[in-house]
Amino acid sequence: MTPSKKKADLFRPDDDEGSFYTYTALTGAALDIAFHTSLNAFGSLDQTDYASFQPCFEKSQDRVVVEDIEIGGQVWRLRCIFDGHAGHAAVDYIQQAIVPTLHTRLAALDASSPPTDATIDTALSSALLAIDDAIGNEARALFPPDLDALSDAQIRAIADDHKDGGSGANHEKLLRAKSGSTALVALVDPPGERLWVASLGDCTAALCTRQERGGPWTVERLSANHNGIEPDEAARVRAEHPGEEGAMLNDPGARYYRCHQRYIVYSLLNSLGDFFCKFPPDFVRRVLVASDPNLKFSATKVDDFLARLLTPPYVSAQPEVRCVRIGSAGDATSSPPAEQLLVMFSDGLPECVLDDFSTAEPYFQVLPRILDRALRSTAEAGFNAEACLNAEGPRSNNEGANGQPTIPRPDAKRNLAAAIIRETLAGGEDWLPVMQAMKYGEVVPKLGKERKLDHVERDDRLSQLLTVEMRGKWMDDVTAVVHRIV
C-alpha cells in the first residue's frame, strides 16, 4: 500500500510559508526503515549502545566516542558526546583528539597504587583544557603577537590559504577556532567501581538505578548545565566581568539568558573552541571576523558584538567533574542495584519534546517511562533486516562514529540508545504535559493517569519528524549513549 501524504501543523513563527507542512504517514517496516536510515551513527561496544539521529539533509554536528583504553593490562571505559556548533571543524578535531590526549594522562599515573578520585578529576580536566588550548594556540601561532605589524591584506593572505589552490591548513585551523563544541566525557575505572563525568555545555549524563527488576527507576543527574538560563552561571559571568552591563543580556522573546558574546550565536557559557569569545578583541576583529567569514549575522550585530567584547574570555573551557561509586560499590546503606544504566544525551533529545533551551530536569520526569518502553522494545524480535537493506529510498549521507557511512543493520532495533531516541520522539505528546508542568512549576501529572497515545498516533508523530517536507533543518541533532553498569 502506498503511504499517504498528510499535513501537519508544525508551528514555526519565523517561517514565511506558514505552519502546515506535508509529510508521509508511515507504518510498520516502512517506518522502521525510515527511522534506521536516519541514524547517522549507531553501534555497540562492551555493554554500551550509541546512536546519533538526524533526518534532515544537513550533516549532524554531534559526535560520539565509545572507546576502551587499555593501560598496563587494565581497561578504562571512555564514553563521550560532543555537540558541535558553527561548523564541523572543531568537533571533528575534538573527537579525534580526546582518546590520545586522555591516554597520555592516564598512562602517566602511578601504577603502584590505585588513582584517587581527585587524580582522575585532574586528568579529565587537563585533557579537555589541553585540547582547547591546542585549538587556540594553533590559530594564534599563524600570526605575530603584534597584529599591527601586518596589513589587512597580509592577514587575509595568511588566513585564506585555501583559495587559489592553496593547502588550506591555515584556514582549517581558523575554522576550528571559529566553531566549537560541548563536551560530555564519562570514564569508568577498570574495576567498574567508580564513574567520572566531565561536562562542558548542555549535554546531560544521568545515572539510572533500580533496586529490583521491573521496579521504579531513580534518576540522578551527573552533569552540569553551563547555560545562561542557570542563575549560578549567569552570576559567575557577571562576577568575572564587573561593571560590564552587556556581559549578560536577557532576550525575553527567547525566554532564556544569553551571554553577551553569544547574543549573536549561542547561549553556552562553557565550551571547547568558540574563540570569538576567548581571543583578544583585536584578533577577533582583524582575523576571525575579517578572514573569509561564515557569519550568519548582520554587520550591525557584528559591530554590537565587538563593542561589548571588552575583557575576554567570556566562555570557559574548564569542565565540571563529578565522581560517583557505581554498581556493587555504590550506596553502602542499601543492597546492590538490580539494574543500573549510565544514560548520556545531547540537548537535542529533550528538545524534541519541549524546545525551549531549558535544562534537562523536565526530561528526567519522563525518562523512567521512556526507559521501560525502550527496554521492552529492544527485547522484542521482529526486525526485517533484508527488507531494510534492500529498501528503495534515500540513505543517510552522514558518517558513523568512525567516519564511515552507515546503513541500517539487523541489530539496530536492539540498540537501547536508538530505542530511547525513538520512544522520546514517538511519544512526544505523552511526555509534553509532564515536562511543561515541571518547567513552569505546576502540578506534575502522574504518568499512567493521562491518556496514552495509541500506536497509530505514535507512528504518525514519528512520521512527521522523519518525513516532513521542509526546507532547511527542522530539528536539532540528537545523540544518546547508554552504558550498562549492572
Image (cartoon, rainbow, N blue to C red):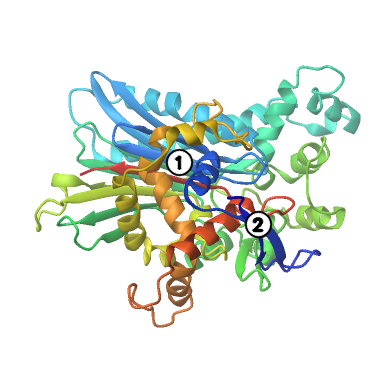
Position of residue 282 measured from the top left corner of the image (x, y, whole percent): 77, 42
Q: Residue 157 bears which disc, if any?
A: none
Position of residue 82 measured from the top left corner of the image (x, y, whole percent): 51, 41
> What amino acid is found at the position of numbered circle 2 in the picture?
Tyr
Instruction: Classify 197 as above or below 355.
Output: above
- Nearest the viewer among 135 and 371 is 371
Q: Quadrant of residue 329?
A: top left
**SS of the residue under disc 2:** strand
User: Which callout, 1 or 2, points to the residue nearer the camera?
Assistant: 2
Circle 2 sits on which residue? 23
Q: Which residue is drawn at 54% across and 25% down?
A: 404
Whether residue 464 appears in this view of the structure is yes
Instruction: Classify 44 as above or below 455.
Output: above
Q: Residue at x 44, y 23 (%)?
A: 100
134 to the left or right of 415: right
Q: How many marks?
A: 2
Q: Residues within 10 Å of mark 2 (few under 14, many from 20)?
A: many
Circle 1 sits on which residue? 51
Q: In which quarter of the image is residue 474?
A: bottom right
32 to the left or right of 15: left
Marks 1 and 2, how far apart at CA: 24 Å
